[in-house]
Image (tube, helix red, strand yellow):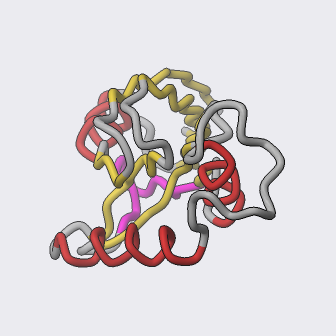
């Protein structure tokens, strides 16, 4: 078994889905691992990772709108408001999604579906520089 580590840096422009599939695919294929498992981990509490459709941009818009309706800003329930009205909703949205993903590698390639892409989901309104740590284990 061999192990590889990498850090992806993703600069966001604010709330929304940021596709970084191609960077991940290039990195995995460059390691020449035949079979294994890739773990991706977002080192943040107000951003998350998802695998989602990468063909129709309406899917991404609908997901963003749904989460905005499900977890609104300025809810009187929130006590944590020091960093602005988008901060606590960002934490809740991160809890409802994932901070890590596991993706199999078979025959040297990520086993993603035809329409699947890897996204960092930025939950804050302002842009940020996000870090996703990759750990690839395999033969």
Quarter holding the N terminus?
Answer: top right
Residue 51 location, quadrant: bottom left
Give the overall secondary structure of the magenta segment. Answer: strand
Magenta residue check for 110: yes
Q: Is residue 21 left or right of residue 111?
A: left
Write the start and end of the magenta stretch as one range: 102-112
Percent x, y for residue 22? 23, 43
Magenta residue check for 57: no
User: Viewer-proximal residue, 79 or 33?
Assistant: 79
Q: Is residue 44 left or right of residue 47?
A: right
Q: Residue at x 55, y 22 (%)?
A: 5
Q: Residue at x 55, y 47 (%)?
A: 86
Q: Is residue 101 left or right of residue 19?
A: right
Residue 139 location, quadrant: top right
Percent x, y for residue 27? 34, 31
Q: Residue at x 68, y 48 (%)?
A: 88
Percent x, y for residue 70? 58, 77
Q: Is residue 138 left or right of residue 126?
A: right
Percent x, y for residue 6? 49, 21
108 relative to 130, above or below: below
Count the labels in the image. Answer: 0
User: Viewer-proximal residue, 133 or 106?
Assistant: 133
């Amino acid at each position: 078994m061999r192990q590889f580590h990498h850090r992806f840096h993703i600069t966001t422009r604010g709330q929304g889905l940021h596709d970084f599939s191609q960077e991940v695919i290039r990195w995995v294929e460059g390691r020449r691992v035949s079979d294994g498992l890739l773990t991706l981990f977002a080192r943040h509490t107000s951003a998350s990772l998802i695998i989602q459709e990468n063909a129709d941009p309406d899917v991404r818009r609908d997901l963003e709108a749904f989460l905005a309706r499900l977890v609104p800003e300025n809810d009187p329930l929130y006590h944590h408001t020091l960093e602005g009205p988008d901060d606590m909703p960002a934490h809740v949205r991160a809890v409802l999604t994932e901070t890590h993903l596991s993706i199999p590698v078979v025959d040297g390639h990520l086993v993603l579906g035809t329409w699947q892409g890897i996204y960092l989901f930025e939950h804050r309104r302002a842009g940020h520089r996000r870090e996703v740590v990759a750990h690839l284990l395999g033969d």
